[in-house]
Image (cartoon, rainbow, N blue to C red):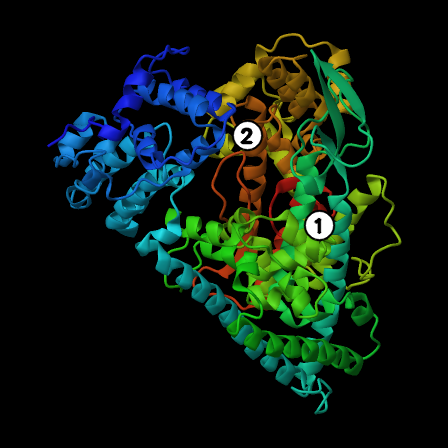
Amino acid sequence: MTDHHQLSSDSDSEKRKLEQAEPTAEPESADYFRQGIGIALSGQGGDDGSDLAENHAAILRNFRLPVQLRRNMAVSIGKQRGNHYLQRMVKQPIQSDHVQRGILSPDKQMTVDEIIDSHDSDNVNETNMPAILGASADKKAQIISLIHSNTWVGPQDEAYLERIWNSMGIKGIEAYFTLFERSVNYGVEYENIECLKDLTTKFKEDTQGLALKYLNSNQELVKKEMEQLGVDGESGKPNQSLGEEQEKRLKEIQEAAGILADAMQAKRHLDQLQVGYTTKHKPGPPLAKIRNGPDMTYVWEQYFHEGPPEMTSIPGQGRGSDKLQPYSEVKAHADELNGIIEGYSAKYPGLYPLAQAGRLEELVKADSPQAVQSMMGEGLRDLAANIKKAIPMISSNDLDYRDLLPIHGQLMGGTAGGKFNWASPVGKFIIKEEVEGHESAQFWVNLGLGALAAAAFVIAELATFGTATFWIAAAAGVGAGVVQAGMSIENWADMSTASKTAVSPSSQLIYDGQVSAAALAAVLDTVFAFIDAAGIGLKALRAGSLTAKGLKRPPVDKIVTETAKNAEKELIAKLPSIGANAEGRETLEKAISQLGVNRAKEASGKSYEQMIEILGKENPLAQRIREVMKRGVISPEDIAMYKKDLKMLAEDVRLGFRTVAEADQIAMILVEELGPLEVVKKSGGWKSLNASTVFGKNTAAGQAMEAWRQSLIKEVNDFMDKAYGGAAKRTGTPGNISDLDVSQTGRKDAAVASADAAKHRDAAVEYLSQKLGVQPGELNKLLDTDLFVD
């Protein structure tokens, strides 16, 4: 038996000649063999047609031979036999009968541990493959890593890797998925792994199955809507006279259309507000060119729809343009609009076809219930026809399942009901591999539709919050091509995951009928006022023509207004007589939280020391008083400057003009002198306030502001409990950066009807707005209450 390194007699003379050659590169170096091949391929000469190509190929590709020998052989062959011969030889497959011809001896049979300990991937061969395939998953992973260690993983290595991965099964691939990805990078084809092959079929079936589920559900929904509105299922024309309930619903639909039209228009304009600057390339000339050493940085405008700003000022040019709007403030308004769109799109799915056709404003202007009925019938008829057309196209794959990217994203996001868990690493891998090699088409075009948003009935259930994505896309004016081209599968997967989180309180309240159209119109008034102040000028451009004045506001009990207006006066009147007892402590805590330390001191006539004694030395508010007592001197000019532009304080910290400690001291002075309400107004609302470094959760100012907000909600709770026998319930996670949801649930011993709940919520809002002296529509922004009522 010959040794593993023994060569056939045909190649012995070649070997001796090659061993005498003088190497020019470092022996055994990584580049040694590549350098030799490169020299050989650049040589001149002709092909003499010798039959030694297989032997030469066997030697050259036998990685058990010394690198120097193989490199010298390539140099010699290039010189002696020519470039064409060498190229053929390199590509020459090594025949399975080489061992029988004596070129190489049979492989030695080894255990898996011996193969691993040898650190030689050539021991991964046919002789040892049965042992490898029968090894544990961990041992197989070590063998795979051994193959990866090769400078070059060739076709035979790829075949071995595919067989090993197949033996591990899907669970094994999941367990070592990072290693599997490396194998794919080395050339492994998942189609050659039997256990993964079947997943491509399952992917097709699950994609089509989910689309058909949506289509069938939406078909039933349209049928039900048409029946409720009294229109024919085929023609869409009215087939019966309107009853009282139908007229009432049509009126609600018409009001909803106006609110939706306004919300979608406002969303379009918010998206175009400039919130900062970016260095990402955009069409048109840049705003600035900044030299960074030998390189040049270009700066463009960044708008809200492009995400959080990369920077809020141009480096070297100060704080930025007056055109900039605070991102957090714009986002707060956008969240309000998205809540309206989300709630109404789920509550009135029959509006979907008219919204996509741009006919909402026309519906608002309809002069009779019959006209509204007729328009709704037309829209639902067209939607029913499109659904009917799409069902067989999905089943026959005329609409290619690989084009349905939103559904792929849902599968990757964990949508249940399929034949495989596509949210798993292997599931996501298969989807990406299947789709990325496919030239996607715009499936909605085959349905005769002009935009992806118009084809939402294929990829979502219309009567769910999930379709809000497509309403919002339409609100942003996103066209068909832009949506598909601009969103990867990962984008759709992230969106699907986000849609599974809790529905926003505002959306749920709208859906449940606890919020009136007048209330939402008031919110829209606030948003449009903000847009107008930003310089866009939309006072006369309200598509739905619905304002708080145009819709009658529901009556609120007189006791609410009177109690709220007198609350502060009553609190101040109590302060002079407070003592060091529980009632006195509670009154002083409320006064400091709502009025500030100095106003509470002035109203009570107490010294700082006396106030601390009433509160108790360990009380957090006592520490706040001590901070006021030991406060350093801040120049009146600086305080006056920050009073005019409170946002400048956070910006100065960011730019290094102020330390965080200095800013916190200044912020506390502003809280005391301006009052918490004025601070939150000047900060652009609660979310904007908490997004700044100045009022973060670890700052004294942030804690003081949260104490004020909690005090207000407690006051509303107490009032509602006395007036209605219920309580305003805070559902957010306590903390100065938490969202606040005031949800009047009615009597403690029984659930109340939606109408009563809406009335009680209106009372809670009226109380807060009267107490603070602000419009009801401003409360969401000021307190982040998610009330969405007027």
Residue that carries the numbered disc 2 in the rendered image = 588
Whole-percent x and y of residue 784? 61, 43
- Name the one closer to the observer, 313 or 195: 195
Q: Residue furthest bottom?
A: 240
Callout 2 environment at 10 Å: few (<14), some (14 to 19), or many (20+)? many
Give above or below for 294 relative to 146. Answer: above
Instruction: Report the mark closest to the observer, 2 or 1.
Output: 1
Does residue 392 appear left or right of residue 357 in this picture?
left
Quarter assignment of residue 257: bottom right
Callout 1 environment at 10 Å: few (<14), some (14 to 19), or many (20+)? many
Distance Cα–Cα, label 2 vs label 1: 28 Å
Residue that carries the numbered disc 1 in the rendered image = 776
- The quadrant the C terminus occupies is bottom right
- The quadrant the N terminus occupies is top left
Callout 2–callout 1 Cβ contact below 8 Å = no
Residue drawn 69% across and 50% down?
562
Q: Determine the secondary structure under disc 2.
A: helix
Q: Is residue 386 visible?
A: yes
Give above or below for 229 relative to 540. Answer: below
Q: Hey, what amino acid is under mark 2?
A: Leu
Decide which of tag 2 and tag 1 comes sooner along the chain. Answer: 2
Quarter assignment of residue 399: bottom right
Q: Hey, what amino acid is under mark 1?
A: Pro
Quarter assignment of residue 469: bottom right
Residue drawn 19% across and 43% down?
129
- Name the one closer to the observer, 86 or 403: 86
Q: Is residue 564 visible?
A: no
Give above or below for 429 relative to 11. Answer: below
